[in-house]
Amino acid sequence: MTKKTTNCLICNSKIRPFLNFGKMPVANGFLRRKQFPKEYFFKLSVAFCKKCKMVQLVKTINRERMFHKNYAFYSSTSKFMAEHFLKIAELIKKRYLKHPDPFIVEIGCNDGILLCHFAQSGIRHLGIEPSKNVAGIAAKKGIKVTNEFFDRALAKKIIKKCGKADVVFAANALCHIPYLNSVITGIKNLLKESGVLVFEDPYLGDIIKKTSYDQIYDEHAFYFSLASVKKLFETHGMEVVNVQHQDTHGGSMRYYISHKGAYKPKKKVSRLLAHEIAGGLVKEQTYKILAKKIALSKKELMELLSGLKRRGKHIAGYGATSKSATVINYCGITPKVCDFISDITPTKIGKFSPGAHIPVYSHAEFLIREPEYTILFAWNHAGEIMKNEKGYTKAGGKWIIYVPQVKVIK
Ligand code: DWN
Ligand code: SAH
């Protein structure tokens, strides 16, 4: 483990990695064979800041390497997520947008999975989406979207053109932005006095509880807890007024943030904070233990896969997720171990997974090839996938999962 220190992305204190995954590719960098020689790699390591309590990447890569005109993740590939966003859209409309001419801004709207519900109701909205391909899909749905990165400067432009917002929403987006202080300044300026920021991201408490280390990859600069979020917004004169745990993406937390004093914080906020402190989320030791559990999880998964290969079993993967880039490359899963990965995203099919270069095939190909064992890389969508794949399971197909524990499900 390197002893080298760097500076915290939030408070600039010295930080030191507790976890080092080694050389990693761009998690959504699916590529063609001719692109193999020029593939970009970087060192993926994670640190905990003792001062502001933020768990974060030690090195972040250029945003244009990740978010561009061919961004591989399309939010609308999951029906479960579409339902999730419909529910939160209804809640936001009812709770915050009842007055005349309300305005909602979404940071990282992707293909418009949430904003379509506001566009359909004729509610004034704006999506901010730097990845041009998915922004284009949102625009085709009749959503107003700007193809830019959100920060303090963009917030200024939005205020000038559209006025201040009642709600700023961000799902699985704020944790992607290393220059978070600029983003929060922008949000603070953009929100009306009574305005609310509603955001959700994978929850650090779940990552620790489930050893779901595959949440750690280039795009995820931060792993939020209430403790770190609360401190961060307080430095900007804002406060957390409510929290709601979500079942999405393997366990997420939704935070409601307002200008300080605009709303009375719910008791749930202080209860969750006490729970985090008791659970050790603000202690360095917790992360040292997590690092050990991750190493053990890798060992168990590779022992299982090697054993199956020794017995000549045919293994494939399901869901060419960003998360799988970490598991595959950290554990050393090669195309000799996992023949192919099934995925329904057209832009991933026919390409190779980043780093290990495992081919990505269509779902139709998965049904034809019927692997004896399938590694469930999209474990966060297990409910939806198990329902759809009853036929494969009934025919004797076996599932390999590694979160929260490495095991085979028949
Ligand atoms: O934070 C992020 C989240 C919101 O989405 C981004 N940084 C990138 C992305 O992460 P991910 O790639 O790990 O997300 P998912 O939702 O776990 O990806 C699921 C993958 O599995 C997609 O490529 C679609 C595919 N899939 C499939 O082939 N069959 C998904 C479902 C539900 C299916 O039935
Ligand atoms: N909100 C969607 C998409 C999450 S993926 C969902 O929950 O499914 C993260 C998204 O954030 C990508 O579409 C990416 O292009 C976008 N993004 C990254 N940096 C951003 C920034 N600075 N401003 C706005 N969006 C950003």
Image (cartoon, rainbow, N blue to C red):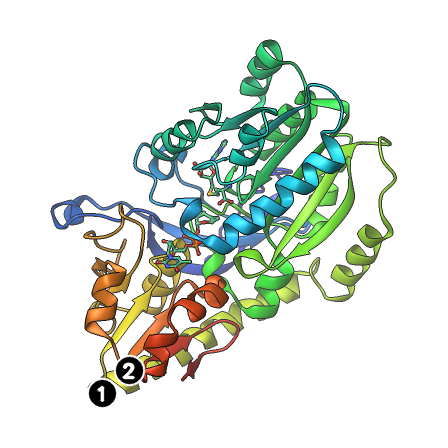
Q: Quadrant of the C terminus?
A: bottom left
Q: CA distance from mark 1 to mark 2?
A: 6 Å
Q: Residues within 10 Å of mark 1 (few under 14, many from 20)?
A: few
Residue bearing mark 2:
306
Q: Identify the residue at the far left of this view.
A: 34
Give me the residue at 67% from left, 18% from top: 164
Tell me if residue 21 comes above or below residue 54 in the rendering: below
Residue type pointed to by label 1: Arg
Where is residue 193 shown, x and y percent of the image? Answer: 79, 23
Q: Is residue 63 left or right of residue 373?
A: right
Give me the residue at 45% from left, 72% from top: 295
Where is residue 395 shown, x and y percent of the image? Answer: 31, 83
The residue nearer to you, when weighing 18 against 186, is: 186
Label drawn at residue 232: none
- Count of picture labels: 2
Contact between marks 1 and 2 (CB within 8 A): the answer is yes
Residue bearing mark 1:
310
Where is residue 353 shown, x and y percent of the image? Answer: 26, 56
Q: Which image quadrant is residue 339 in?
A: bottom left
- State whether label 1 is within 8 Å of ligand 1: no
Residue type pointed to by label 2: Ser
Q: Identify the residue at the far bottom of this view.
A: 311
Tell me if residue 399 comes above or below residue 255 in the rendering: below
